[in-house]
Amino acid sequence: MTLEVFKKLPLGGVDRRAMVGALAERGPIVAREALAADRAKARPAGTAIPKDVAVIILGGSNGLTRGLAVQLLFGERASVYCVHLDSEKMQIGPHHVAAILEAAEAEGLRARFFNRDATKPETVAEVIAAVKEAGFRAVHLVNGIAAGATKRYEEHGPTQVKELDVAFDLVLQVPDFSKPEHLRKLGLVDVEVATPVDIERTNKFMGTSSLLWAEPLAEAGLLVKGESVVAFCDYDYPKDDPVYAMGPLAGAKLLQRETMQQIRERFGVTTARLCYPAVATTALGAIPGGSLMYALTAQILAEKGQHKDIPEMSREAVAIFAPGYAGEDVRIDRAYQAILPEFFARRDALRPEDVPAAFSKLCGG
């Protein structure tokens, strides 16, 4: 089978000028509608987070960590401080934030957002000062930063992977599988080799950023031994994945796991891995092969009645704050991991003429 090689463009190749206009015109209402839909699914999960404890969430303007913020605020009635850097004109994140802050204020909930680079020491200091000023006794920390090089290490060399070319939602900025015509083609995309700068940046954002926060939080007395939880969102990638497993993304995840062990040993807090499946986010859409990975696994899970949306996954994720949680992995991805052998078999057999019918549960094709 000969597959066409195509270029994987940022955000599916959307027209940037049209996107900016659409965000300005429709961003606020789309964000409010998305929040209303998510709030309708939010319900208490039994975390009982004390009123004098806040949750700091790093990264994630439209993925699992945004879902966590919504669940914590409107399901658990907890106080939430979010830190991620988004363009006011070019990204949906600020509109999501505005909608969440508006709704939280209306219900007397405490939510704050810092549109900052979460890996800068001055950002850490600013957030700690705000938390202390608000009178919080302790914090939990969830690291969901997803900013890394979707490339391979030099020893593995460049390659090509099977991928699905998908149109992105102009406003939400995620792969849009809602209509058959949005699945444009099946082909191959190139995977480049990472530079030393790529590797260093990926390690900074996804490898050591938890420790960057844990040390000053502990010094400020906000990481409380035996009470605080420090967690990170960990995609448990297939060990032979030609992109994720053979490049800086995997290296950073391994470094993050080592960092979490240091945090546990040094500060006496509980650490957690939130193991999640492939999700149709902006970040996944940037990974070569990521759109196909999500679409085909979601199709299989939907056929089995096991597909979960972000609100459902977020409700499961807050188990790390429940009484009695002892640091075991939270496997939001259990069903996903179980169907990976079937995914690989279908992916290898998939032909261009099978699109979009092979994804009928996603787009009705």
Image (spheres, grey):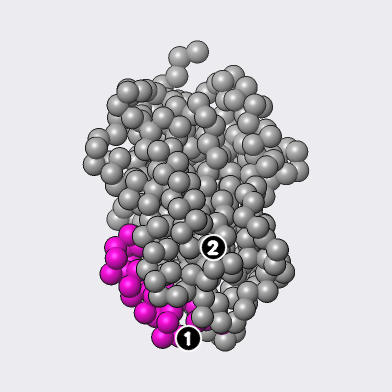
Q: Which residue is mark 2?
A: 269
Q: Is residue 359 left or right of residue 262?
A: right
Q: Is residue 258 visible?
A: yes
Q: What amino acid type is highlighted by mark number 1?
A: Gly
Quadrant in which the C terminus appears: top right
Q: Quadrant of residue 298?
A: top right
Q: Residue at x 24, y 37 (%)?
A: 196
N-terminal label among 1 and 2 = 1
Where is residue 249 drawn, in percent x and y?
41, 40
Q: Look at the image and give the residue range highlighted in magenta.
A: 109-136
Residue 158 sits inside the magenta stretch:
no
CA gap between label 1 and label 2 equals: 21 Å
Residue 90 vertical placement versus 300 (above, below): below
- Helix, strand, or loop for circle 1? loop
Residue 333 vertical placement versus 37 (above, below): above
Q: What amino acid type is highlighted by mark number 2?
A: Val
Q: Which residue is mark 1?
A: 135
Where is residue 6 drawn, in percent x and y?
37, 28
Q: Residue at x 41, y 30 (%)?
A: 246
